[in-house]
Image (cartoon, rainbow, N blue to C red):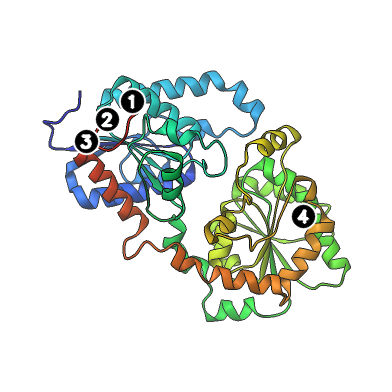
Amino acid sequence: MMQSRDPKRRICLIATEESGDRLGSALMKVLRQRLGDGVEFVGVGGRTMAREGLESLFPIEELSIVGFAAVVQQLPKILRLIRNTADAVLEAAPDALVIIDSPDFTHRVARRVRAKNSAIPIVDYVSPQLWAWRPGRARTMLGYVDHVLGLLPFEPEEYRKLGGPPCSYVGHPLVEQLSSLRPNAEEQARRNTEPPVLLVLPGSRRSEVRHHLGVFGATIGRLQAEGRAFELMLPTMPHLEATIREGIASWPVKPQIVVGENEKRAAFRIAHAALAKSGTVTLELALSGIPMVTAYRVGAIEAFILRRAIRVSSVILANLVIGREVIPEYLQEECTPENLAPALHDVLTESPLRRRQVEAFAQLDQIMSTGNKSPSVLAADIVLATIRKGRGTSSGVSS
């Protein structure tokens, strides 16, 4: 039963990845500003949520699993964590459950909670990519999610069209980080100086790095052989540094490796162009004003599945937000040095391709605007409104 007589609001948050941990931390900070000592937090999170007062049920590193084989091997452990987390939520009987990204884990917890206690409002912070694949999830979510907090401006309309729960655009966390992505006058001068700084971004997971380093290195070698001058930089995170250094050992041009988030942002502020793996980094680059070429390679089995599941014409996040395909993408068998090198040459020089991207990126501030409220403030407002409303008035729970 809900503990309605207790004046203190109890809010449960579940985040199992670093990006979700950052979102959860920012949300907790605003909720505490709103409610003061009248709120307590329970659930699952990482280091930044711990700093805001959350004692996590388990270390989120326990779910740092990459690769199909690893998932299968650890499935009993994953299922146990899902059950234990759902049981802990039910025991806490919170005023609301906020699940943050990681849908393979968090949505399973939410479904178990809803089945056992339908009185607990559930808010989903970060929509699954149902606009890209498995659109039927929208109607399924109607049964256990009361409100979705979308990071992308087109998501509310997608939920409406697909018959899902209410969805509100609260803004992408990158919108709050523009000052660290965009150059000052000195950095802009370096961005415009020869030789141009070229970023190489092969991915944020070891499997992605291994799939992309070979073809990216061959592409860079081709550019050099054609006489194109550039200064090469490869930003990465500490846990990938050894994999990166091993992978670039045979590159004909050795990049300067920069390690850590702050160093990556510093490289972004002076970069002239980028060769990047498809993903969130494309939106980061676009908001930084850096023209790019994107590529993506996966294993044969994953490629077979994705080809049959993807329902959008572009998998480039920046293209989807802009609403047209201004960034070229080379997927799977098209991801070759023969294709990538000429496109990269174009974004390094004052070509029509580069100009189209620069003009499109200039529109992003308006497209992604959240008015005068930050994403975390908008998210907190909706969580509190959902608590006040209670369950069953507008969630459209399926029978």
How busy is the neighbourhood of tag 2: few (under 14 within 10 Å), some, or many (20 plus)?
many
Q: Tell me which numbered mark, 1 or 2, is placed earlier along the sequence.
A: 1
Residue 199: x and y, percent? 68, 63
Amino acid found under the numbered disc labelled 2 = Ile
Q: Mark 4 = which residue?
A: 216
Quote the CA–CA distance across marks 2 and 3: 8 Å
Marks 3 and 1: in contact by CB < 8 Å?
no
Q: Residue at x 44, y 30 (%)?
A: 140
Marks 1 and 4: in contact by CB < 8 Å?
no
Residue 146: x and y, percent? 32, 37
Q: Residue at x 54, y 57 (%)?
A: 261
| Disc marking residue 120 | 2
Q: Mark 3 = which residue?
A: 390
Amino acid found under the numbered disc labelled 1 = Arg
Q: Secondary structure at mark 3?
A: loop
Quote the CA–CA distance across marks 4 and 1: 46 Å
Work out whether residue 263 can be spotted.
no
| Disc marking residue 114 | 1
